[in-house]
Image (tube, rainbow, N blue to C red):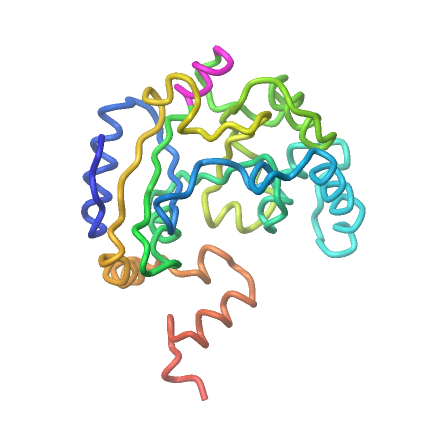
């Protein structure tokens, strides 16, 4: 499928087309710049495995004094999801089950660049990659093995698998988070048989402001997607909500 999204209504049409094409539940991802690849952050900029494992273990040892509900030390995948939620480079790539959330991320930055909304069939991706036509969970052997490789800085194994996480942080609930977990530096759109499980819609730069206004009417705001005091304050001070009443 190939469709430009210039209004929220276009996203609904794209969702209907994607459901006909893939025939399964869908995950979504928004890119503010259409040239970005579906590649996890730890594989960008030529980072090596030592960098990956070093920052992961520093996070593991420092997070418990800063976060009230850290996962057990033995739950490697949960730790990866927590790292990802707080923007540490990991082998995870964020997706959402909510198309409006993906569209929000496609239009909130880089106003002069065309954006993109990507659509993924997690079931078909896993069928192609590991012969398992489900979105995997934290206790699946492939997820356990891939998570251990990630924290150890080891590469190899299936290039990417789709994983439904346990919601251990409010951001994951608000954003209806899902992930692809990559064991090798392959972007989703470069995987074998990618045309079976991933599609892309363009978002024209000139439509971003109008779409953002439509999303605001539907209560899609930063403060709702990042439910903490810092982002509430950012929304209030930026005029996203009630700024005219703030002294």
> Residue 66's x, y, as percent?
74, 56
Judged left or right of residue 231, residue 88 is: right
Judged left or right of residue 20, residue 143 is: right
> Residue 152's x, y, as percent?
74, 30
Q: Which residues are magenta?
A: 123-131
Q: Quadrant of residue 196?
A: top left
Q: Is residue 154 magenta?
A: no
Q: Nearer the viewer, residue 196 or 27?
A: 196
Q: Quadrant of residue 98?
A: top left
**From the viewer's perspective, is residue 191 above or below residue 106?**
above
Q: Residue at x 80, y 46 (%)?
A: 61
Judged left or right of residue 54, residue 121 is: left
**From the viewer's perspective, is residue 100 above or below residue 77?**
below
Q: Residue at x 64, y 38 (%)?
A: 80
Q: Is residue 126 magenta?
A: yes
Q: Residue at x 59, y 35 (%)?
A: 91
**From the viewer's perspective, is residue 129 above or below residue 137?**
above
């Amino acid at each position: 499928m190939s469709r430009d999204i210039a209004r929220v209504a276009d996203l609904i049409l794209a969702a209907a087309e994607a459901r006909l094409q893939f025939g399964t539940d869908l995950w979504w991802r928004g890119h503010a710049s259409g040239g970005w690849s579906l590649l996890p952050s730890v594989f960008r900029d030529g980072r090596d495995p030592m960098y990956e494992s070093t920052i992961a273990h520093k996070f593991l040892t420092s997070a418990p004094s800063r976060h009230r509900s850290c996962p057990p030390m033995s739950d490697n995948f949960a730790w990866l999801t927590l790292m990802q939620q707080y923007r540490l480079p990991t082998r995870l790539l964020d997706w959402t089950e909510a198309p409006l959330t993906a569209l929000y991320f496609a239009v909130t930055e880089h106003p002069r660049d065309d954006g993109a909304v990507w659509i993924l069939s997690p079931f078909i991706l896993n069928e192609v990659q590991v012969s398992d036509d489900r979105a995997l969970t934290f206790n699946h052997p492939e997820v356990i093995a891939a998570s251990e490789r990630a924290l150890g800085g080891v590469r190899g194994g299936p290039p990417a698998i789709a994983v439904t996480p346990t919601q251990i942080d409010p951001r994951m609930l608000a954003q209806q988070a899902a992930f692809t977990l990559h064991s090798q530096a392959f972007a989703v759109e470069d995987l074998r048989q990618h045309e079976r499980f991933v599609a892309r819609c363009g978002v024209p730069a000139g439509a971003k402001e109008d779409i953002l206004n439509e999303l605001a009417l539907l209560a899609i705001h930063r403060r709702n997607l990042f439910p903490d005091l810092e982002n509430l304050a950012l929304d209030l001070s930026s005029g996203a909500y009630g700024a005219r009443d703030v002294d």
